[in-house]
Every structure is written in structure tokens, then in C-alpha cells.
């Protein structure tokens, strides 16, 4: 082998450094410099992110319907009318007006918190669905795809937030990016949530994220209809 | 009372087991057989919602205020609150305005009779799951096109989203479903969900009236709103019959023309087509032979033909039945044993009698057939041989078994050997292939009467050791042809070594190839030919192989032919020095006919 050790090390480092950058889905990689590629505007970024969130929510709805169809909740859920999700601690605006009144930074932070909170539970959900024989592989793949989409959406929203900050639309009070800790999905009694509960909660939260993004876009990018 | 209460509670439990109530249509219609219950809750724009109930069979609770609704939001407040707004205009309706509506929040509502402090019904839900959008507005249609036949047309249907839904911001993302049917028909055709505000309908029939309607729902949710008002779509049919008529006519005429063309083509090119489709089967062919002759030719022509072919191998003779026939004709069963040709030839095994070859003594049966002016059949010729072999054991020439034939390499001489037989024109040439006929007699006319000879190979000479033979040679003096073998023997003096073989060795030991008269002896009547006779049984015959024909150099006083010794021949047998052979001028190897022989007679 003619490769020396430093060359190998440089190669390894280059490979390691290149890989995470490819995972960001929003912006294309401009290989030929700023002149050779079309940098999307903030409106385009928002559209992409909203599209992505819509797909994610649709997936979660499908999975939830399937679950409800084949696995009706057992009778021991009679007493549990109210399902507390692990993300219930996050303060989220519960209506259109409330969301519109919220500051952009806070709204962005809420979105990011929600997405961050679902990173591990979605992975957990996929694992548990994959191991059960009751689910077919199609549902298990949907769960995996859902987890990936949540991850990508989070990256995308971070990109959008970064761009907004660059453009001066956001103040510097957005601190939720690093402080959003991953939460363990625990129910009231402290036990792990079941698959159905996870699906129910994620369906709700994905709808929240989708609507928040739409409201945010309407406020950031002024359109005549907004 | 308790029974009904327990029933009610059971029903409540079943209801709440689902966790939430999606306001399905079955809940909307009041069930008269039940007690007071909620008939449904709906939201139109995901910002407010309403709930309805019914008193049911309890008619005494129908007055307003008897039943009250309490709700609870499962956020952080756990207290039951009463319905914020009982709609005045509508009976039994509770309206939650924007202030009291929280999305993504679980609501539980209870229907209570405060006076009796009984909760008749309870339901839980979240608002986004009970959203039923308002129907779209502004439904209209435009004609896209009409088909060429005038029987079908396409339309484009347009509508506007419900005004209550905030689609501009995207608070509600709607999808639409268009349905149409022929008027007064009972079955509605449904098209796929459309996220835009227009859709095309294809394949409608002219002269039919269609009803079109549209409804919408939130994407990723399951609750459709109400249908919009139907619109009527109708396009009058334009009579355009003449456009279809020429088309069919042209089609018919075209098909007929093509058919006629094909028929003409087939009939004009019939022969060629026959050749293409049904190729002639090639007739069997033998190279160089006219198949007609094969079918109709005479036997001798056939024989001459076949003999001239390469396919005619000497081995063919070996399997020839009439060769076998030779052996079979042996009278003496003792002769039928598997003794070799040499033994047959020498007559060794049979008896210890002297090998007196007297051709004249046993020429009765064979010659008779030879004189037959007809073409002798193979069987007749075969009778020649057995005739000789039937002479007795002494006859050296008997027959040769087919087994010995392969040992003889007579292939080269096969063609040449035809010629001796040509003296008898009637004899087929193939008879003489590979054979050496022994001259048995001479016709007065100068022809040679042949009897089939035998070929011998060297090793087989060893068998004739047991007898000492007195060989008497009778040289036929009147121009008979003698074999070179005989001549060689005549010329050769004494066999070199007195081997174990007795009797008859020089002649039989001659090489097969080119041996015309293998082992043939010319019986010499005169005893004066002693110089050329082999008095006793010589040892192993080691004479050189003799060519087919040796030129007769001269005839000596004893009427013996002096032949030219063969020039270069592969010696199958060891060569015996030919001491006594006078030096003869080499003459071209040629065949000596009896005519020539007559010339040579001194």
C-alpha cells in the first residue's frame, strides 16, 4: 500500500466531515459556487418544510387509523379518557389566534422543541413495531419512515431558523435549539407508553407542527392572502 | 331504575372506551329508544364547535334547562364547567366559541340533569377530530370538448373553498371529492380526491343530463363535510351521422381490396409459394450414379456401376454371402471346421494323403458351371469353389473363410484382379475381386477355366507341417496362365530352411497381396520338373510377397513360366533368396493374357 498514514487520516476525516452535511435536505449543495446554483428563498424553504410536515402528519394518521382498525383499545382504557402525552409539558398555543399572537421566536422554539421531543420515542416506536408479529412490515416501515421524516424536519426547521436569523427576522432569544432535551415518553403512572398511545400523541403533535409552520410562514413571508 | 342506570353506565363505559368521540353520523340522529344522550358535536372551521343532545324517551326533560351540559378540558384544569352558550335559536345545542375552543385538547362533555343530579351521557373528543368542513361554493362547469362522433364530451368543473375555512393561511388544508350521476339515477360516480379547486370529468354522454356535486374534508382526517348543491350538466347532441358513414364504407372497401390483392398474389405466385412453403424432398443420391439406372438398370450394368464406385470395398467381399457359401458347400463335414484357409488350401488337416493336385480330376462340377454361357450367379460361382473344395482334402485351394480374408491385404489388387476374369465375359467382375481363381482347365478356344482361389497369409502356413507332400506340378502347357506364385515357386529352388512346417509351404506362404493364386498349385503331370519342385516339406515359407501380376519373361523348356521377380513389395513373409531365378530383364508389370501367353510359348 502506497498510502501513508497521514493521507489515510486526512481521507477519513474528510469522509466523516462530509457525511452529516449531506443529510440536510432543504438546500441543494452548490458545487459550483454561489453563481452556479439557485439558493432558495425563505418562502421556498418554508414551502418545503411545510410540505414535509404535511407528509409526516399524513403518515402518522395512516398508522393511527391502522392501529385503531386492527387493535381497538382494550377495555382497560375505559378509565383513561384523557391521555397525557409526554409532550404535554411543552406549552403550545391551542388555537389559531393564540398561535398568531405568539412571537416568531417562541413559535419557532416550540416547533423545534416538539420535534426534538419526538426523536427518541419515534425510534422506540419503530423498534417495538418491528418486533411485533402483529404488524406487517409495511406498518413497521411506515414507522421508520416517520421517524426519519421527523428528524429531517427538525433539521429543516433549524435551517429555516438559521436563515431567519441571518435575515434579521428573529431575535437572538432563540435558545431552544440546544436546550431541547429529549424526553422519555412516560405516562402518568410512569410506565412506558404503549404503541397506540404513542401513535395517538404523535398524530396530534405532527398536526400541531404543521399548523404552526403555516402560521409562521404567513407571518414571516407576507403574502397577500395571509 | 337501577337497571336502566346500570344500562346507561354500561353504555357510557363502552362509549368512553374509545377514548374519544369522533362525531360519526350515527351519533347525530337522536335515538328515541334511549334516554337523554348527545347526538353529536361538530366543528366547521376548527375554531369553534357545537354539540347537540336529545332528551330521548324522557319526555319530562324536554323543557329547556332540565338537561345541562358540562365540559372539562383535560389540560391543567380539571373542573367541570357548564356550557358557555346555549344557542337560543336552536334547541338543545351548546355552542363553544373561539375563546372556549382549544385545539389539540381533549374535551369531555356530560349531559346532566341537575335536578336529579344524574349524568345521562358523556363524550370525549378532541376538536380537530370532529371537524366537518362546510361545503364548497361556486360550483360551475365548462365544456372542454366534444368527441368527433358527437356522442361524448368532457367538462371541467370548478368550485371555491368554503368561506369559513381559512385555507389561505393553511389553517385548514382541504381536499375535495366530486361526484356525478345521470339524473334521477341512484348511483353516484365518485372521482378521486382533489386538492385543487377544479376537476375534469371525461366520457359524459351527450343528450344526457348529469348531476354534479362536491364535498370536502381536511386532509389527513376522515370527516367529510356536507355536499354542495348539485349542478346540472347537459350537452345537446349534434347530429353528425355522415361523418361515420364514410369511415365504415372506406374500411369495408379497404378490407375487400386487401383480400382481393392477397388472393391475386397467391394465385400468381402459386408455384413459388409452393416451393417456399412445401420444399421438395431431395431424392436419394449416390454420387456418380444415375438414380434412374438404379431404378431400371440391368443387373450387369448395376454391377459394373457399383464396382466402379469407391464404396465397393474389398471387405465387402468378406461379408458377401456367397463367400460363406463356399464353405457351406463343403461336402465333407470335416472340412467345415474352423481350420484356416491355408489348411483348406493345403488340405493338410484332412488327410495324410498326398497332395496331389490334379485339377483334371475334379473339374467335373465346377467346370460345368463355368462353361455356362449364362452369366453365372454368385451361387454358381460359389459352386466353383466348393467344387474344388469338394475334390477332397487334397485340394489345397478350398475356400477361404471370410475370417482369413481380413488378414490379406488385397485391397490394392482388387481392381486389377478383375481382368483375369474378363476372359469369361459372363462372370461378373465383382466375383473376382480379392480372389484368385485357380486355373483348372483351358478351353479349346484358348480361354482359361478358373476356379476360385484362396489367399493365404504367412502365419497360417505353419499349420501344414504334419504332412509331407509330394507336390506334383502339372504345368498346363497349352498357354495356361499360371500364377506368379507358382512361378516363383518354380523359380525358387529350395526353401531356405526346413522349418517345422511340412508340405506345402512356399506357395501358401506367399504374401497375400497380389497373390492371384494363393497356394495354388499347378499340377504338373510331368515329373521332369523336379528342379522346381519342392520334394519335401520345406520349412517356414518365407517367400516375398508377390505382386498381382508378374510379367512372364520366358517360358523354359519345361513349359514353365519364368516370371519377373517383383520389384519392391512389402514383405509380409521373410524373403527367401531367389537363387535360382535367372536374372531377368525387368519388364513393365503388366497383365499377361492367355493370348500373350500363347505368344510366349516356345
Image: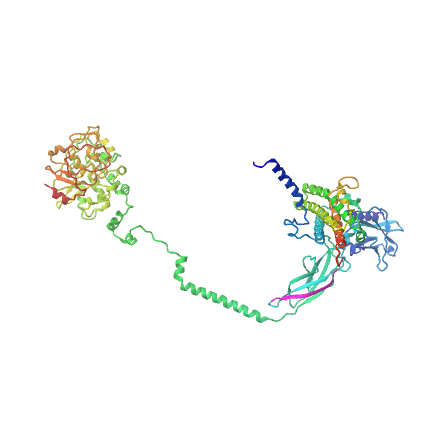
* Residue A85 visible in this rendered orientation of the protein: no
Q: Residue at x 66, y 62 (%)?
A: B201
Residue drawn at point x = 60 percent, y = 71 percent: B240
Q: How is the image coloured?
A: rainbow
Q: Percent x, y for residue A176?
A: 77, 44
What residue range appears in magenta? B135-147
The front one of B406 and B4 is B406
Task: Decide if residue A178 is on the left or right side of residue B204.
Answer: right
Report whether A100 appears left or right of B202: right
Please name whichever residue, B320 or B326, is drawn nearer the observer in this view of the structure.
Answer: B320
Is B559 magenta? The answer is no
State the image quarter where residue A132 is shown.
Answer: top right
Residue B582 in picture, x, y percent from top left: 14, 35
Q: Where residue B321 sits: x, y (%)?
A: 27, 42
Q: Magenta stretch: dominant SS?
A: strand
Q: Is residue B309 above or below residue B189?
A: above
- Image quadrant assignment for residue B365: top left
Q: Which quadrant of the rendered structure holds the C terminus of chain B?
A: top left
**Whether residue B147 is situated above or below residue A92 in the rendered picture:** below
Quarter holding residue B202? bottom right
Position of A23 compared to B426: left or right? right
Asked whether B3 or B12 is in front, the reply is B12
Outermost right residue: B115
Amino acid at each position: 500500500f502506497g498510502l501513508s498514514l497521514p493521507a489515510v487520516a486526512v481521507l477519513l476525516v474528510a469522509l466523516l466531515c462530509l457525511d452529516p452535511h449531506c443529510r440536510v435536505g432543504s438546500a441543494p449543495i452548490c458545487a459550483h459556487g454561489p453563481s452556479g446554483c439557485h439558493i432558495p428563498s425563505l418562502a421556498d424553504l418554508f414551502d418545503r418544510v411545510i410540505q414535509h410536515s404535511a407528509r409526516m402528519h399524513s403518515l402518522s394518521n395512516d398508522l393511527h387509523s391502522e392501529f385503531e382498525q386492527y387493535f381497538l383499545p382494550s377495555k382497560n382504557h375505559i378509565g383513561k379518557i384523557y391521555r397525557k402525552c409526554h409532550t404535554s409539558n411543552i406549552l403550545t398555543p391551542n388555537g389559531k389566534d393564540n398561535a398568531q399572537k405568539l412571537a416568531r421566536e417562541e413559535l419557532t422554539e416550540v416547533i423545534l422543541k416538539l420535534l426534538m421531543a419526538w426523536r427518541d420515542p419515534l425510534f422506540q416506536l419503530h423498534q417495538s413495531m418491528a418486533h411485533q408479529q402483529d404488524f406487517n412490515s409495511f406498518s413497521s416501515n411506515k414507522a421508520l419512515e416517520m421517524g426519519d421524516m421527523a428528524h429531517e424536519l427538525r433539521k429543516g426547521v433549524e435551517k429555516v431558523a438559521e436563515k431567519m436569523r441571518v435575515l434579521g427576522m428573529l431575535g437572538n432569544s432563540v435558545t431552544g435549539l440546544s436546550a431541547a432535551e429529549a424526553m422519555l415518553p412516560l405516562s402518568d403512572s410512569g410506565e412506558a407508553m404503549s404503541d397506540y398511545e404513542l401513535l395517538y400523541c404523535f398524530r396530534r403533535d405532527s398536526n400541531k407542527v404543521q399548523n404552526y409552520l403555516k402560521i409562521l410562514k404567513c407571518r414571516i413571508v407576507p403574502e397577500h392572502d395571509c | 331504575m337501577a337497571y336502566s342506570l346500570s344500562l346507561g353506565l354500561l353504555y357510557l363505559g363502552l362509549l368512553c372506551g374509545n377514548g374519544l368521540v369522533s362525531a360519526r353520523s350515527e351519533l347525530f340522529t337522536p335515538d328515541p329508544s334511549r334516554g337523554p344522550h348527545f347526538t353529536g358535536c361538530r366543528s366547521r372551521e376548527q375554531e369553534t364547535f357545537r354539540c347537540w343532545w336529545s332528551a330521548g324517551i324522557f319526555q319530562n326533560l324536554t323543557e329547556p334547562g332540565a338537561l345541562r351540559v358540562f365540559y372539562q378540558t383535560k389540560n391543567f384544569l380539571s373542573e367541570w364547567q357548564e356550557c358557555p352558550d346555549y344557542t337560543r335559536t336552536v334547541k338543545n345545542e351548546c355552542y363553544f366559541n373561539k375563546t372556549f375552543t382549544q385545539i389539540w385538547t381533549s374535551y369531555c362533555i356530560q349531559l346532566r340533569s341537575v335536578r336529579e343530579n344524574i349524568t345521562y351521557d358523556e363524550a370525549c373528543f378532541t376538536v380537530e377530530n370532529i371537524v366537518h368542513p362546510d361545503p364548497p361554493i361556486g360550483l360551475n362547469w365548462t365544456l372542454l370538448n366534444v368527441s368527433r362522433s358527437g356522442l361524448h364530451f368532457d367538462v371541467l368543473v370548478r368550485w371555491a373553498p368554503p368561506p369559513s375555512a381559512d385555507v389561505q393561511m393553511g389553517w385548514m388544508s382541504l381536499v375535495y371529492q366530486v361526484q356525478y350521476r345521470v339524473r334521477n339515477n341512484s348511483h353516484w360516480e365518485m372521482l378521486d380526491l382533489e386538492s385543487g379547486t377544479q376537476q375534469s370529468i371525461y366520457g359524459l354522454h351527450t343528450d344526457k343530463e348529469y348531476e354534479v356535486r362536491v364535498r370536502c374534508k381536511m386532509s389527513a382526517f376522515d370527516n367529510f363535510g356536507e355536499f354542495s348543491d348539485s349542478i346540472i350538466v347537459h350537452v345537446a347532441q349534434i347530429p353528425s351521422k355522415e361523418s361515420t358513414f364514410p369511415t365504415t364504407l372506406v374500411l369495408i372497401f379497404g378490407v375487400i381490396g386487401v383480400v382481393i390483392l392477397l388472393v391475386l398474389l397467391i394465385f400468381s405466385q402459386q408455384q413459388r409459394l409452393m416451393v417456399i412453403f412445401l420444399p421438395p424432398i431431395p431424392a436419394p443420391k449416390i454420387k456418380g450414379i444415375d438414380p434412374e439406372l438404379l431404378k431400371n438398370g440391368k443387373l450387369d450394368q448395376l454391377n459394373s456401376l457399383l464396382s466402379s464406385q469407391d464404396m465397393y470395398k474389398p471387405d465387402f467381399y468378406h461379408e458377401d454371402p456367397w463367400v460363406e457359401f463356399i464353405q457351406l458347400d463343403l461336402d465333407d463335414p470335416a472340412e467345415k471346421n474352423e481350420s484356416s484357409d491355408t489348411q483348406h488350401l493345403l488340405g493338410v488337416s484332412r488327410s495324410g494323403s498326398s497332395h496331389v493336385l490334379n485339377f483334371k480330376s475334379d473339374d467335373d462340377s465346377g467346370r460345368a458351371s463355368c462353361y455356362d454361357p449364362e452369366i453365372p450367379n454368385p451361387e454358381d460361382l460359389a459352386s466353383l469353389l466348393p467344387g474344388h473344395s469338394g475334390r477332397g482334402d487334397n485340394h489345397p485351394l478350398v475356400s477361404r473363410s471370410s475370417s482369413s480374408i481380413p488378414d490379406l491385404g488385397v485391397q490394392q489388387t482388387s481392381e486389377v484382379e478383375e481382368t483375369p476374369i474378363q476372359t469369361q465375359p459372363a462372370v461378373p467382375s465383382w466375383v473376382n475381386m480379392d480372389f484368385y481363381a485357380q486355373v483348372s482347365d483351358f478351353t479349346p478356344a484358348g480361354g482359361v477355366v478358373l476356379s476360385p482361389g484362396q489367399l493365404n497369409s504367412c502365419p497360417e502356413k505353419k499349420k501344414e507341417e504334419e504332412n509331407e507332400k509330394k507336390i506334383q506340378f502339372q504345368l498346363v502347357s497349352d498357354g495356361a496362365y499360371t500364377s506368379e506364385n507358382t512361378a516363383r515357386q518354380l523359380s525358387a529352388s529350395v526353401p531356405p530352411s526346413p522349418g517345422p512346417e511340412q508340405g506345402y509351404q512356399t506357395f501358401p506362404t506367399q504374401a497375400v497381396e497380389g497373390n492371384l493364386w494363393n497356394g495354388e498349385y499347378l499340377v504338373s503331370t510331368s515329373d521332369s520338373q523336379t528342379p522346381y519342385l519342392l520334394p519335401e516339406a520345406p520349412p517356414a515359407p518365407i517367400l516375398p510377397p508377390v505382386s498381382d501380376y508378374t510379367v512372364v519373361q520366358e517360358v523354359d523348356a519345361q513349359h514353365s513360366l519364368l516370371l519377373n521377380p517383383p520389384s519392391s513389395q512389402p514383405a509380409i513373409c521373410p524373403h527367401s533368396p531367389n537363387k535360382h531365378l535367372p536374372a531377368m530383364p525387368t519388364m513393365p508389370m503388366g497383365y499377361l493374357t492367355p493370348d500373350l501367353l500363347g505368344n510366349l510359348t516356345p
